[in-house]
């Protein structure tokens, strides 16, 4: 027996189907690591609005959370991030639809004098792989959780076990997954070389490999594939380097010195042969092209410029250009620079230091004062489509876009917004 739905009933049925499909799509939407699906702060999504109301996009929910700069990751309708209360750090799992806490784990993370200058952290972003969540706290405590329950599977105190020095202002690197391992910069004293980067087995936390003796800083590693070869790119205190992610062996290195060894931002890969890296503190930006010579990868510098200096934010690659926010302790500007030539296309005022995400032909910008904007970026300039004030307390955590839902946070609250 068939059922025929007429008139308003048919419209209601179609609406319900649409909502179910939309809900399913949002549930499947993922942002499982620092930088999103491809670790490049871009996401393949359609349906973002071309403009917002004056007071900003529709707020789905908002709630207080706690101190810290950890970005939000998303998987299967759940959010994962980190925050601090007094002398403790917390890893938390939230319901993506409501913001309600599903589980959280608290552990001691003593506040230090060095943390006081810019806030105590945590800074690192949770990594989701399969049924596990991996986090690293400001004091270099590495934890592996069951994703669904918050039960600890294994843990390492990296500072204690590897005699590593906790970086000033706290550890900031976000782990990256490669095959059955997770990889993190660790470092250590001169009498214990060969552990600048360490890979741990995801299953039990055992050390798969440790290698190199670079001085560790705050930048998070990325994975690239060049000429059919997987490479782990690490931005260390004095250089940009490529390692074999299977064993940590050095493939190439290129100098990028910075005051205080403060290379903080994440390198940008164009998907073909060129890397962009940038730092503040009287440093600048450079592009390095990888070439193959006698069966080896060789870096060739394309350009270096002090006109663009990313502090601790991020940049996105669109077409032949890189777009991001330049500035450290003085005025900041949003910029566009030609990746191949280093030619500065434009500089745009109107934002303090900012982070950004590229999606659906647009760029979503969040500056440190909590101002959120929707814009388009091209070699001709930045066109701001909408802008609103949403957050209040030092918004250094980069925005997370899962489907058409944007998640943002500052040092007090977390918010979900509908950008469709």
Image (tube, rainbow, N blue to C red):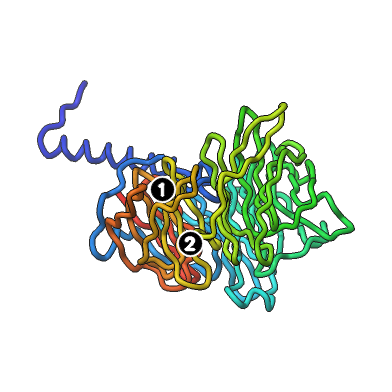
Residue 354 shows in the view: yes
Circle nearer the viewer, 2 or 1: 2
Mark 1, Cα crowd under 10 Å, few <14 / some 14-19 / many 20+, is many
Asked whether residue 96 is in view, the answer is no
Q: Is residue 148 left or right of residue 419?
A: right
Q: Image quarter for residue 375?
A: bottom left
In the foreground, 408 or 274:
274
Which structural element holds mark 1? strand
Residue visible at 34% across and 59% down?
373
- As drawn, the label of residue 295 is none
Residue 220 in the image: state x and y as whole percent.
62, 52
Residue found at x 63% / y 46%: 176
**Mark number, residue 358:** 1
234 or 207: nearer the viewer: 234
Question: Where residue 18 sits in the image (x, y, percent)?
Answer: 27, 38
Q: Residue 396's spot in the image, x, y percent?
A: 50, 65
Spot occupied by residue 214 in the image (x, y as percentages of width and height): 76, 53
Q: Looking at this rendering, what residue extends furthest in the right direction?
A: 191
| Circle 2 residue | 326
Residue 61, compared with residue 207, is above or below; it is below
First reached walking from the N terminus: tag 2 or tag 1: 2
Residue extending farthest to the left is 7
Which part of the image, by quadrant, shows the N terminus? top left
Is 393 placed left or right of 207 in the picture? left
Of the pair 417 and 92, the residue shown nearer to us: 417
Q: Residue at x 42, y 56 (%)?
A: 335
Element type at mark 2: strand
Q: Which residue does the image show at 42% across and 68% down from the upper left?
A: 352
Cα distance in 3D space between marks 2 and 1: 17 Å
Observer-nearest of 110 and 115 = 115
């Amino acid at each position: 027996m068939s059922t025929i739905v007429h008139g308003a009933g048919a419209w209601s049925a179609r609406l319900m189907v649409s909502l179910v499909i939309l809900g399913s799509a949002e549930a499947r939407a993922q942002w499982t690591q620092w930088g999103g699906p491809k670790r490049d702060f871009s996401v393949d999504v359609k349906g973002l609005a071309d403009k917002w109301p004056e007071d900003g996009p529709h707020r789905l929910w908002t709630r207080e959370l706690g101190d810290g700069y950890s970005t939000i990751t998303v998987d299967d309708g759940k959010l994962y991030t980190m925050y601090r209360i007094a002398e403790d750090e917390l890893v938390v799992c939230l319901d993506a639809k409501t913001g309600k806490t599903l589980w959280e784990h608290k552990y001691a993370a003593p506040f230090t004098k060095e943390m006081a200058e810019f806030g105590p952290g945590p800074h690192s972003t949770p990594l989701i792989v399969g049924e596990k969540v991996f986090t690293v706290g400001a004091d270099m405590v590495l934890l592996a959780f069951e994703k669904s329950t918050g039960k600890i599977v294994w843990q390492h105190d990296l500072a204690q076990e590897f005699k590593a020095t906790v970086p000033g202002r706290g550890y900031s690197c976000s782990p990256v997954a490669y095959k059955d391992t997770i990889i993190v910069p660790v470092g250590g004293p001169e009498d214990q070389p060969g552990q600048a980067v360490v890979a741990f087995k995801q299953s039990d936390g055992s050390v798969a490999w440790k290698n190199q003796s670079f001085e560790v800083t705050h930048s998070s590693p990325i994975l690239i594939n060049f000429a059919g070869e997987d490479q782990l790119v690490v931005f260390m205190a004095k250089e940009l380097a490529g390692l074999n992610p299977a064993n940590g062996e050095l493939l190439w290195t290129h100098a990028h010195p910075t005051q205080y060894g403060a290379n903080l931002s994440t390198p940008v890969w164009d998907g073909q042969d060129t890397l962009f890296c940038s730092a503040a503190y009287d440093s600048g930006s450079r592009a390095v092209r990888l070439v193959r010579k006698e069966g080896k990868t060789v870096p060739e510098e394309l350009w270096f410029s002090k006109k663009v200096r990313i502090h601790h934010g991020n940049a996105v690659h669109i077409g032949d250009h890189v777009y991001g926010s330049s500035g450290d302790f003085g005025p900041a500007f949003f910029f566009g620079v030609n990746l191949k030539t280093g030619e500065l296309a434009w500089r745009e005022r109107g934002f303090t230091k900012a982070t950004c995400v590229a999606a659906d032909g647009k760029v979503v910008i969040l500056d440190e004062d909590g101002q959120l904007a929707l814009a388009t970026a091209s070699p001709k300039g930045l066109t701001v489509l909408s802008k609103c004030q949403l957050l209040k307390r030092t918004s250094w955590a980069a925005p997370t876009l899962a489907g058409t839902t944007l998640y943002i946070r500052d040092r007090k609250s977390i918010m979900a917004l509908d950008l469709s």
